[in-house]
Image: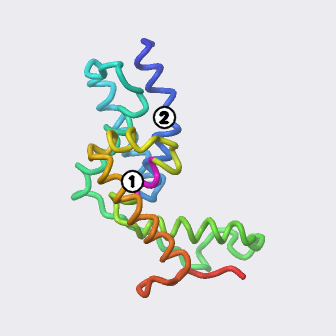
Amino acid sequence: MDEVKWLIAREIPRLRRYATALVGDAAAADDLVQDCLERALRKRHLWTRRGSVRNWLYRILYNVFVNQGHRRRRVRLQVQLEDAPGAMAQAPRQDQGLICDDIAAAMDRLPEDQRAAIVLTALEGLSYEEAAAVLGIRIGTLRSRLSRGREKLRALYTGHDSRVALRRVK
């Protein structure tokens, strides 16, 4: 395996995490990562080696995500309580788990551009400059999306958004 293939293979877990944050579904995220990897391997000769291969892959993944946007609709699977395997045998959730669920639900309600900016900076740890380059936007635009996204998350999480009230833990 050549060096570029090895560098790309190392980034698969991070790509999966980013894709899952973008689409909210593990199967759809795997499809998105597969499309990204296919494109990256086919066009690996275009990587200039001046920047990080991770940022290059994030950029490809985000572009694939945006390009597939008209074909992809976020669909939540609804399972009836009686149909859920072992639904009654599960241990009660703790407060920390509820908080994580609420934050994840709030993230799902963010516009795609704000969610992508927050995930790249907060979850993936990219600098503002790197995240702006991945998204193909100016740094001021990134800061604006982060500010609006954080404010919307705060409103959703604390229940100050009149459209959505997430549960609160005492």
Question: Which quadrant of the figure contains the N terminus?
Answer: top left
Q: Amino acid at mark 1?
A: Ala
Residue 12: give its label: 2
Magenta stretch secondary structure, dominant: helix
**Residue shown at 76%/72% (left/top)?**
89
Label 1: which secondary element: helix
Graded by Cα atoms within 10 Å as few (under 14), some (14 to 19) or many (20 or more), the crowding at tag 1 reads many
In which quadrant of the rendered view does residue 88 lie?
bottom right
Residue in the picture at 31% in, 45% down = 135
Residue at 48%, 74% in the rendered image: 78
Is residue 52 visible from the viewing direction of this image?
A: yes
The answer to whether marks 2 and 1 mark residues whose Cβ atoms lie closer than 8 Å is: no
Q: In this rendering, would 74 be left or right of 166?
A: left
Tell me the crowding category of disc 2: few under 14, some 14 to 19, or many 20 or more residues within 10 angstroms, Cα based.
some
Q: What distance separates the C-alpha of mark 2 from that of mark 1?
A: 17 Å
Q: Position of residue 123 (x, y in %)?
A: 53, 49
Element carrying mark 2: helix
Q: Which residue is mark 1?
A: 116
Front residue of 107 and 153: 153
53 versus 36 height, above or below: above
Amino acid type of the residue that numbered disc 2 sits on in the rendered structure? Ile
Tell me if residue 119 is in the magenta stretch: yes
Q: Is residue 64 left or right of residue 6?
A: left
Decide if residue 135 is on the left or right side of residue 89: left
Between residue 6 and residue 48, name the one nearer to us: 48
The nearer-to-camera label among 2 and 1 is 1
| Residue 94 forms part of the magenta stretch | no
Residues in magenta, as a range: 115-120
Q: Residue furthest front?
A: 140
Q: Is residue 168 left or right of residue 13?
A: right
Pinpoint residue 161: horizontal percent, then vertical percent: 45, 82
- The disc at residue 152 is none
